[in-house]
Image (tube, grey):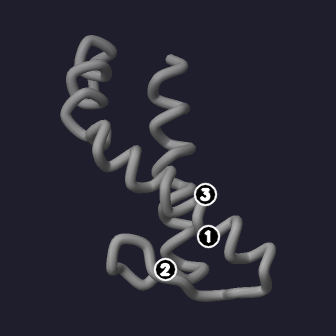
């Protein structure tokens, strides 16, 4: 991959603002539920457990990493 291709590829594969907002909502809701001792909740009709929350956090972390380059 040529260095000039990195920015366009990142732009093409970076999650949308809506996807990031959904991930942030999932992480926040799951964090609150975890404090109450719950290991599974629903967010916008979707079941959220540890794998889903971890995937949402990974998406947020990846976007932050892309944006700081």
Give the mark nearer the N terminus: 1 vs 2: 1
For residue 8, which numbered disc appears in the image?
Answer: none
Callouts 1 and 2 close, C-beta under 8 Å: yes
User: Which residue shows up at 33% across the image and 79% down it?
Assistant: 45
User: Which residue shows up at 49% across the image and 56% down it?
Assistant: 25
For residue 30, which numbered disc appears in the image?
Answer: 1
User: Which residue shows up at 70% across the image and 67% down it?
Assistant: 32
Q: Is residue 42 above or below residue 56?
A: below
Q: With 60 as the anchor, is 5 left or right in this view?
A: left
User: Which residue shows up at 25% across the image and 27% down it?
Assistant: 11
Assess disc 3: are there few (<14), some (14-19) or many (≥20) residues with their C-alpha within 10 Å of its C-alpha. some
Give the mark nearer the N terminus: 3 vs 2: 3
Q: Secondary structure at mark 2?
A: strand
Q: Quadrant of residue 16?
A: top left
Q: Position of residue 69 (x, y in %)?
A: 50, 17
Circle 3 residue: 28
Circle 2 residue: 48
Callouts 1 and 3 close, C-beta under 8 Å: yes
Quadrant assignment for the N terminus = top left
Q: CA distance from mark 3 to mark 2?
A: 11 Å
Q: With 63 as the anchor, is 28 left or right in this view?
A: right
Q: CA distance from mark 1 to mark 3?
A: 6 Å
Q: Quadrant of residue 10?
A: top left
Q: Is residue 16 above or below residue 48?
A: above
Q: Position of residue 39 (x, y in %)?
A: 66, 87
Assess disc 1: are there few (<14), some (14-19) or many (≥20) residues with their C-alpha within 10 Å of its C-alpha. many
Q: Nearer the viewer, residue 34 or 61?
A: 34
Q: Secondary structure at mark 1?
A: helix
């Amino acid at each position: 991959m040529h260095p000039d291709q990195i920015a366009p590829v990142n732009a093409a594969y970076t999650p949308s603002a809506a996807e990031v907002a959904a991930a942030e909502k999932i992480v926040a809701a799951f964090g609150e539920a975890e404090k109450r001792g719950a290991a599974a909740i629903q967010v916008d009709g979707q079941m959220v457990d540890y794998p889903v929350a971890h995937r949402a956090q990974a998406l947020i972390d990846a976007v932050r990493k892309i944006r700081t380059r």
